[in-house]
Amino acid sequence: MRRGVIGSDVGRALEIVRNGGLVGLPTETVYGLAADASQKTAIAKIFSVKGRPNNHPLIVHVSSLDVARTWSSQWTYSAEILGSTYWPGPLSVIVQKSSIVLDEVTGGHQTVAVRVPGHELALELLQQFKGGLAAPSANKFGKVSPTTAQHVLDDLGDDVDYILDGGPCRVGVESTIVDCSLEVPVVLRPGGITAEAIESIVALDNVDSGISRAPGMLLAHYAPLCEVVLVENMQQAQGSLGDANSKYRILDASIDPTSFASAMYSLLRQCDLDGIQKLFVVLPEPIGIGLAIRDRLTKAAHGSKNQSR
Ligand code: AMP
Ligand code: MG
């Protein structure tokens, strides 16, 4: 009989990743689908379980800045200062890969993304494991990310060997990605560490683009089943209701963007569970965590428009 798939047994998670299995990994951003980054067959399982295209590179999670350096052949000043300031935390840096990094992890690129997650259970597992865990979000490709252990089970069921339950994710949106392999670093994806916080310690190129330019980043992603309509204020939401034949809901992300980010994916999932057809979201200002919320919801809106319901 299959033992309980959700639990807090780090020893069991360790045994599974060492044996090439998949573990649902709690982090402060979203739950990851983690596998040993040095085992080709384990990495292949991540792609097949998620239905993720092979050329979408994975982020390697490690326990410390010291370990992170070993994954790069050219650890840059910007990677060093950002890592030493914001790790453990919701920030991934892209650097030239070292020879230990599998092509399967980087999608064939010469660069690799690494981060030290800010979650006690994840760190405990990584410290005991010592190596790197490749971990994209633990959901089917293109769908809403998971922020609880139950979300992971709902999405992946038996395809994940064990889910470490670390409670609901604190930040709730994926890590900020900074390309530190360039002379002047660029934010490729906004996230929990704000562009303002990064710019306070390193000069950035294109800081306010908020547009994801990393390979594997698509216009449509993070999509619930319901249609997502983005509005700038409540009046616009009310005005867009039309004859409101469909079952709708209005969420306001502008009042407290930090709390909204942390609850966002749960709220999107709840809309689908409640049979909502049209979700209106009042967007936060495009500053701080508001940039990450706008980025994810814009993609969710594209994804929901393009899928058959
Ligand atoms: P996630 O989809 O949240 O797992 O984050 C992974 C994303 O990080 C990928 O889809 C890429 O956009 C980005 N990324 C990871 N590795 C690299 C890399 N070597 N070069 C550029 N972007 C990367
Ligand atoms: Mg994802």
Image (spheres, rainbow, N blue to C red):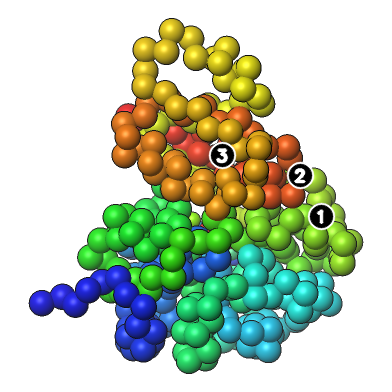
SS at mark 1 in the image:
helix
Residue 123 vertical position relative to residue 189 in the rendered view, above or below: below
SS at mark 2 in the image:
loop
Pick whichever, 282 or 73, lies toward us.
282
| Residue 296 place in picture, x, y as percent | 57, 44
Q: Quadrant of the C terminus?
A: top left
Pick whichever, 84 or 56, lies toward us.
84
| Residue 80 place in picture, x, y as percent | 78, 79
Q: Is residue 211 visible?
A: no
Distance of mark 3 from mark 2, alpha carbons? 15 Å
Instruction: Identify which amino acid the numbered label 1 is placed on.
Output: Glu
Marked residue nearer the N-terminal end (3 or 2)? 2
Instruction: Identify which amino acid the numbered label 3 is placed on.
Output: Leu
Which residue occupies 64% across, 50% down? 258
Which residue occupies 57% across, 81% down? 62
| Residue 192 place in picture, x, y as percent | 66, 58
Which residue occupies 39% across, 84% down? 10
SS at mark 3 in the image:
helix
Q: What residue is shown with label 1?
A: 196
Distance of mark 2 from mark 1, alpha carbons? 8 Å
Task: From the viewer's perspective, tell me whether residue 148 is left or right of residue 232.
Answer: left
Task: From the viewer's perspective, tell me whether residue 173 is left or right of residue 53.
Answer: right
| Residue 100 place in picture, x, y as percent | 56, 86
- Asked whether disc 2 touches disc 1, contact meaning CB atoms under 8 Å apart, the reply is yes
Distance of mark 3 from mark 1, alpha carbons? 21 Å
Figure quadrant of residue 224:
top left
Instruction: Identify which amino acid the numbered label 2 is placed on.
Output: Ile
Q: What residue is shown with label 2?
A: 287
Q: What residue is shown with label 3?
A: 297
